[in-house]
Amino acid sequence: MDDTPAHNPQQLDAKRLERFARHIVLPEVGGAGQAALAKAHVLLVGLGGIGAPALQYLAAAGIGRLTLVDDDDVDISNLQRQTIYTTRDVGHGKAVAARRWVSNFDNALDVTISDTRITPETAARMVEGVDLVLDGTDNFATRLAVSDACVAERVPLLSAAVGRFQGQVGAFAGHLVSSPCYRCYVGDAFDAEDCDTCAEDGMLGAMAGWTASFAAMQAVRILIAATGGMGDPQWGKLHLMDGLKPGLRTLTIAKDPGCRACGDFT
């Protein structure tokens, strides 16, 4: 784990108020909501097609503390959709490059990075103490490890995925009574890393941007919910985006009382 000292973003001085003025004039956000964002700690797992563009809007929203996790390096093929990286970043670690982007964008934000591989053994340590996890990783084994850790640590999870012309964003809080976790949605059959990849199937770059920005909006919704904000956090709602139609539809995921991760929270 590599820490970077930063200024305190929780203090909304004149410059910070000016920076976030377009948020603050929204009745659904206001000063209380912006202060809540400044105090929030978000763990962003995966800095690829979802994580890279989502980071731009999380940082722009003034999320005060960000922990960025990815064990991969930037590849030239990433630049078609992973919009925080440049040609100069190719061959360098994504976590380091992402931290550099945030520092250039807003050096008042507190950023911690890690290139540790997420496993069932490491996930709990990563998740502990954060306010929200946004998972944009590309395989079910990692997603389920993150989800199980979120349930155990009582941390809400936004899970986002994208491929070809389709995207999905779901909000899960399996530690709450009647609210499902991600494992309730996909089941136990996917605790493996064999998963379709965008290298095989392709992906429209802008589709990653749409999905990621939608995930960032849902993150803001969750983080300011205590202030009245943007309404219901939408636990158990899975939003499916179709870039070809285009269109969006929403499914409700039921809590599985037999789920091995969250079944006890009933």
Image (cartoon, rainbow, N blue to C red):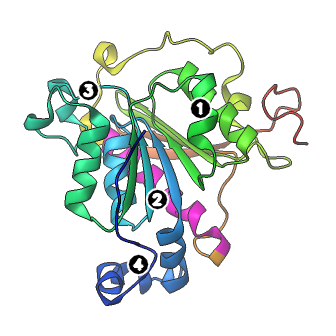
Asked if the residues shown at circle 2 and circle 1 are in contact, with their CB atoms under 8 angstroms apart, the answer is: no
How many numbered circles does the render carry? 4
- Residue 218: x and y in percent read 52, 56
Magenta residues span: 208-226
Residue 260, relative to residue 87: is it above or below? above
Q: Secondary structure at mark 4?
A: helix
- Residue 253: x and y in percent read 72, 39
Asked if the residues shown at circle 3 and circle 1 are in contact, with their CB atoms under 8 angstroms apart, the answer is: no
The three-letter code of the residue at mark 4 reads: His
Q: State the predominant SS element of the stretch in magenta.
A: helix
Residue at (14, 29) in percent of width and height: 90
Q: Earlier in the sequence, mark 1 or mark 4?
A: 4
Q: Earlier in the sequence, mark 2 or mark 4?
A: 4
Q: Nearer the viewer, mark 3 or mark 4?
A: 3
Q: Quadrant of the C terminus?
A: top right
Q: Which residue is tagged 1?
A: 123
Q: Which residue is tagged 3?
A: 73
The three-letter code of the residue at mark 2 reads: Met
Seen from the viewer's position, the closer of residues 62 and 4 is 4
